[in-house]
Image (cartoon, helix red, strand yellow):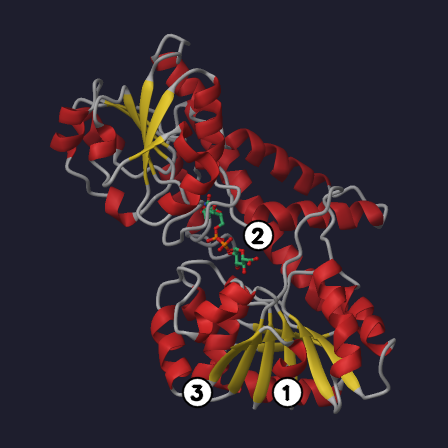
C-alpha cells in the first residue's frame, strides 16, 4: 500500500519505518528541511533502540522516502497518517494548529478517495474538526480515522510491531477495511483490532495514559505512607501486583513520571473535562502528587546535610525521564538540578544518552562526567534519578573512593536496602525505611 506519514518525530518516524518494514511504500513529510536532508541521506534523527537497522534497510530497499513537500509526499497515497505535535497551549489544552493546518492543505491536495488518520494524541472531537477542515477545500471523498498510538519510548519498535491492541476509530466501513488490511501483519498473534467511533478512540488514548499516570501517583503516595508507617513499598508492590485485577506492571514508585506524554495528556484530559463542565477530581490529585514527587528526595538530602546545601557538590546519575531514551522532556532530574542550584550547590552529571540534550538546556551551569565514575570525584553525595541498567550493579569500591561521604540518594530504588547498609552507606530511597 502507498502510505504517507506527515511529521517525522518519534511517532512519525517509528510509524513510517515499521510500515515500510511490512512491505508498504512509505513517504514521510516534514517541514524541517534539515531533518529531511539528514533522513534522506541515511542519518537517523532520534535515538530509539532497534529503529536504525530497520530504517537503514528500508531506505536502501527504496520503500522509505522523505520530502518537505506535502504535495509530492501524498501523491497516490491510500492512507495519510498525521503524526504532528500537539503541545499544550497556555491554558493546558492541546494546541491543534499543526494538525488543522495540514488538514486544511490536504483538502486542496487530495485527488482520490483517501483515508486520513489522526495518530497524534488529540482531544475528543478533533477527527470532526479535521474532517471539516479538509471538506472546506474539496469535494473528493475521504474518511478521517482516529488511530491513537500506544508506543513507549525505548521500546517503540517492539510496541509497534507487536501491539497489545490496535484502536481504529471510524464508522466508515470502507476506511475500516483499508485500516484492517494495513494492520493485519501486526496482529497475526491474535491481539485485537478494536473498531469504534472516532470520539471513543480519541478518549481511549487519554484514558490509557491518565490511568497509568494514576497508578504511578497512587504508588508514590503508598511509598510516602510506607516510610511514615515503617512498611516496605517493594513488598506492598509485590503483594498487590500479583492480583490480576491490579497487575504487576507500572507499580514502581520513584521521583515522578515525566516525558512528553503523561504530563501533557493528564493535563489535557483535565482541561477537556473542564470544558465539558466536569471537574475530574482524581486527575487533579494525580498531577499534584506528581509535582511534589519530583522533589521527593530533597528533604532527605537537606536533613543529611543539616539543612544547608550551599557549597555542597553533588554527583547525579541519570537525566533522561526514563532509561533507554535521550529524552529529557519533563525529566524529574532537571527539576532536582534547578532546585539544588538555587540552594547554592554544584552538580556533576552523567547519563548514557541524554548528556547532549541536557547540555543544550543547562550549558555550563553544571559539569558533565565522561563516564559514570568520574562525575563522582569529590562529590558530597550521589543522587540517582534514572534507572539505567548500567547503574544497577556498579563498582561500590569506586563509588566510595570517589565520594567525600558514603551517601546515596536513590530516586529509583536500584539497590537492596540491606546490602547498602552492609556496605556502610547512608542510603535513602523511595518508600523503603533503612
Ligand atoms: C507513555 C505510555 O506508556 C505509552 O503507552 C504511550 O504511547 C506514550 O506515553 C505516549 O502517549 O506517546 P512513555 O512516555 O514513552 O510512554 O514512557 P513510559 O514508559 O510510559 O514512562 C512514563 C513515565 O512514568 C516515566 O517517567 C517513568 O519513569 C514513569 N514510571 C513508569 C514510573 O514512575 N513508575 C512505573 O512503574 C512506570
Circle 3 Cα neighbour tier, 10 Å, few/some/many (<14 / 14–19 / ≥20): few
Q: Between tags 2 and 1, which lies in front?
A: 1
Q: Between tags 3 and 1, which lies in front?
A: 3
State yes or no: discs 3 and 1 in contact (Cβ < 8 Å).
no
- Residues 172 and 70: in front is 70
Disc 3 or 2, which lies upstream in sequence? Answer: 3
Report which quarter residue 377 is drawn in: top left
Disc 3 and disc 1: Cα gap in Å? 16 Å
Circle 2 Cα neighbour tier, 10 Å, few/some/many (<14 / 14–19 / ≥20): some
The residue positioned 53% from the left and 83% from the top of the image is 26
SS assignment at label 3: loop
Circle 1 Cα neighbour tier, 10 Å, few/some/many (<14 / 14–19 / ≥20): many
Disc 2 or 1, which lies upstream in sequence? Answer: 1
Disc 3 and disc 2: Cα gap in Å? 32 Å
Q: Between tags 3 and 2, which lies in front?
A: 3
Say if disc 2 is inside 8 Å of ligand 1.
yes
Report which quarter residue 139 is drawn in: bottom right
Say if disc 1 is inside 8 Å of ligand 1.
no
Left or right of residue 68: residue 273: right
Left or right of residue 59: residue 1: right
Residue 234 coordinates in the image, percent (x, y): 36, 39
Disc 3 or 1, which lies upstream in sequence? Answer: 3
Q: Is residue 84 above or below residue 270?
A: below
Rendered-image quadrant of the C terminus: top left
- Residues 221 and 262: in front is 262
Q: Indicate which disc residue 77 carries.
A: 1
Residue at label 2? 261
Residue 297 coordinates in the image, percent (x, y): 42, 26
Q: Is residue 327 above or below residue 376?
A: below
Residue 114 coordinates in the image, percent (x, y): 71, 86
Report which quarter residue 33 is drawn in: bottom right
Amino acid at each position: 500500500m502507498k502510505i504517507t506519514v506527515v511529521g517525522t518525530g518519534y511517532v512519525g518516524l517509528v510509524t513510517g519505518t515499521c510500515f515500510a518494514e511490512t512491505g508498504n511504500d512509505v513517504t514521510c513529510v516534514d517541514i524541517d528541511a534539515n531533518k529531511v536532508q539528514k533522513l534522506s541521506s541515511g542519518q537517523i534523527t532520534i535515538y530509539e533502540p532497534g529503529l536504525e537497522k530497520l530504517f537503514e534497510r528500508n531506505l536502501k530497499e527504496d520503500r522509505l522516502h522523505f520530502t518537505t513537500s506535502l504535495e509530492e509526499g501524498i501523491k497516490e497515497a491510500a492512507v495519510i497518517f498525521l503524526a504532528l505535535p500537539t503541545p499544550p497551549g497556555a491554558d493546558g489544552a492541546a494546541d491543534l494548529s499543526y494538525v488543522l493546518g495540514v488538514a486544511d492543505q490536504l483538502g486542496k491536495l487530495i485527488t482520490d478517495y483517501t483515508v486520513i488518520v489522526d495518530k497524534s494524541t488529540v482531544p475528543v472531537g478533533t477527527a470532526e474538526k479535521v474532517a471539516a477542515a479538509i471538506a472546506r477545500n474539496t469535494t473528493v471523498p475521504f474518511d478521517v480515522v482516529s488511530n491513537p498510538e500506544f508506543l513507549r519510548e525505548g521500546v517503540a519498535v517492539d510496541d509497534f510491531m507487536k501491539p497489545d491492541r490496535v484502536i481504529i476509530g471510524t464508522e466508515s466501513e470502507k476506511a475500516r477495511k483499508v485500516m484492517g488490511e494495513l494492520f493485519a501483519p501486526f496482529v497475526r498473534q491474535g491481539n485485537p483490532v478494536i473498531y469504534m467511533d472516532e470520539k471513543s478512540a480519541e478518549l481511549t488514548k487519554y484514558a490509557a495514559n491518565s490511568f497509568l499516570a494514576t497508578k504511578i501517583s497512587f504508588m508514590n503516595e503508598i511509598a510516602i505512607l510506607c516510610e511514615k508507617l515503617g512498611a516496605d513499598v517493594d513488598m506492598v508492590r509485590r503483594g498487590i501486583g500479583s492480583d490480576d485485577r491490579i497487575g504487576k506492571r507500572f507499580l514502581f514508585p520513584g521521583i515522578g513520571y515525566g516525558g512528553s506524554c503523561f504530563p501533557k495528556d493528564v493535563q489535557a484530559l483535565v482541561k477537556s473535562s473542564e470544558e465539558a463542565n466536569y471537574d475530574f477530581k482524581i486527575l487533579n490529585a494525580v498531577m499534584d502528587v506528581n509535582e511534589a514527587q519530583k522533589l521527593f528526595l530533597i528533604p532527605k538530602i537537606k536533613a543529611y546535610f543539616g539543612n544547608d546545601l550551599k557549597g555542597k557538590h553533588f554527583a547525579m546519575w541519570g537525566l533522561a525521564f526514563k532509561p533507554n531514551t535521550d529524552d529529557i522532556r519533563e525529566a524529574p532530574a532537571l527539576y532536582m538540578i534547578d532546585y539544588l542550584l538555587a540552594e547554592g550547590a554544584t552538580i556533576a552529571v552523567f547519563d548514557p544518552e541524554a548528556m547532549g540534550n541536557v547540555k543544550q538546556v543547562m550549558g555550563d551551569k553544571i559539569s558533565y562526567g565522561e563516564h559514570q565514575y568520574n562525575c563522582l570525584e569529590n562529590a558530597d553525595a550521589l543522587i540517582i534519578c534514572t534507572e539505567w541498567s548500567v547503574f544497577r550493579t556498579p563498582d561500590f569500591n569506586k563509588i566510595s573512593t570517589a565520594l567525600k561521604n558514603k551517601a546515596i540518594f536513590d530516586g529509583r530504588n536500584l539497590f537492596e536496602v540491606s546490602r547498602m547498609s552492609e556496605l556502610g552507606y547512608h542510603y535513602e530511597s523511595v518508600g523503603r525505611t533503612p
